Amino acid sequence: MMAGGEKRTPMAAGIGSEWELGREGFELIRGLARRACGLDLKPGKEALVAARLARRARELGLNGIPAYLERIRREPGGGELVALIDALTTNHTSFQREPRHFDLLRERVLVPAARHGCEVAIWSAGCATGEEPYTILMHAAEVLGEARLASLRLVASDISTRALEVARTGIYSADRVGMLPEVWRRRYLQRGSGACQGYVRVKDTLRRRVEFQRRNLTGSLAGLPHFDVIFCRNVMIYLGRTVQELLVRRLRDRLVPGGWLLIGHSEGLMGIRHGLDYVMPSVYRRPQSGREQP
Ligand SMILES: C[S@@+](CC[C@H](N)C(=O)[O-])C[C@H]1O[C@@H](n2cnc3c(N)ncnc32)[C@H](O)[C@@H]1O
């Protein structure tokens, strides 16, 4: 009830009609997303958020966005939060995306490791539907040889359970693998037949080498080893500034001295105190021990 006993209608609350989000609804979701995983839903994203919530509301058989917001309000930390985050995250990715990073991976990490017989640990942080870690694996298989893939520890994590489901199956529409060389497609993918016509699956020998984990990058990173390379590409653009700064420092602390942090080509660490050495756009290295900055 509002002052004077007036009832607060959905319109007065700024929620609008059945499939509209409204200002108050947007602020509610914005606050939840920020607290849950650092997502920064900037003003201007209202229509996108409304479309995603509408899809989720329909999945649940609810008759509109206000009903969905009501459910979220009733249990803000409840099970629906996982599905809400699934709905709000953007999982766009592709095989061989931003290929310069894979050249660097081969030349600066995999080839020396093969030469010296060293183990390598790599983390695809924010792996979405898996194309990034599988691309890493294919390059590793080329350089190390499939028989020596056991010397590679590859962790791939994301907060989105839906994206991870796809990643774990390793099944993709055949039109998504066109950028892989033909010989790789034959070597590392199985072509579907019958009901699976038009799909490919990453071969078992590769798939079982990836440790997929659901992990919130703003939450605990406990249990992770130190990595030679962290791919955290096209994730930070969705996060607020303070969260970005914190995350970069935490990723730095997960790198071995001299380890590499690769971010998206359109991302930058300008103005962020990170204590990493700049190598080239989107490529940073943890200094060797003794040269660490705060
Ligand atoms: C655009 S995709 C990038 C995929 C891949 N790294 C690439 O560059 O192609 C961004 C991914 O970051 C994930 N993400 C966003 N915020 C996250 C967080 N706080 N913790 C873990 N993953 C997050 C999203 O779920 C999404 O799958």
Image: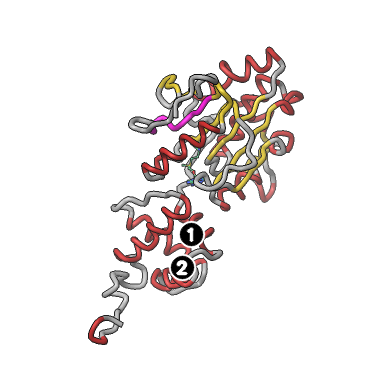
Q: Quadrant of residue 48?
A: bottom left
Q: Position of residue 242 (x, y in %)?
A: 38, 43
**Picture residue at 48% right of the left edge, 63% below the top:** 56
Cβ of mark 2 under 8 A from ligand 1: no
Q: Which residue is mark 1?
A: 84
Q: Position of residue 194 (x, y in %)?
A: 69, 48
SS for callout 1: helix
Q: Quadrant of residue 205?
A: top right
Q: What is the number of the mark on residue 72? A: 2
Q: Quadrant of residue 25?
A: bottom left
Q: Position of residue 66 (x, y in %)?
A: 39, 72
**39 versus 226 height, above or below:** below
Cβ of mark 1 under 8 A from ligand 1: no
**Picture residue at 59% right of the left edge, 19% below the top:** 109
Disc 2 residue type (three-letter): Ile
**In the shown orientation, is residue 148 left or right of residue 60?**
right
Q: Earlier in the sequence, mark 1 or mark 2?
A: 2
Q: Is residue 42 magenta?
A: no
Quarter holding the C terminus? top left
The answer to whether the residues at label 1 and label 2 have Cβ atoms under 8 Å apart is: yes
Which of pointers 1 and 2 indicates the residue nearer the eye?
Answer: 2
Q: Is residue 265 magenta?
A: yes
Residue placed most toward the observer, 262 or 169: 262
Magenta residues, start to end: 260-268
**288 versus 86 height, above or below:** above
Mark 2: give few (<14), some (14-19) or many (20+) Cα within 10 Å. some
Disc 1 residue type (three-letter): Leu
Cα separation between marks 1 and 2: 9 Å
**In the shown orientation, is residue 128 left or right of residue 186?**
left
Mark 1: give few (<14), some (14-19) or many (20+) Cα within 10 Å. some
Q: Position of residue 6 (x, y in %)?
A: 25, 85
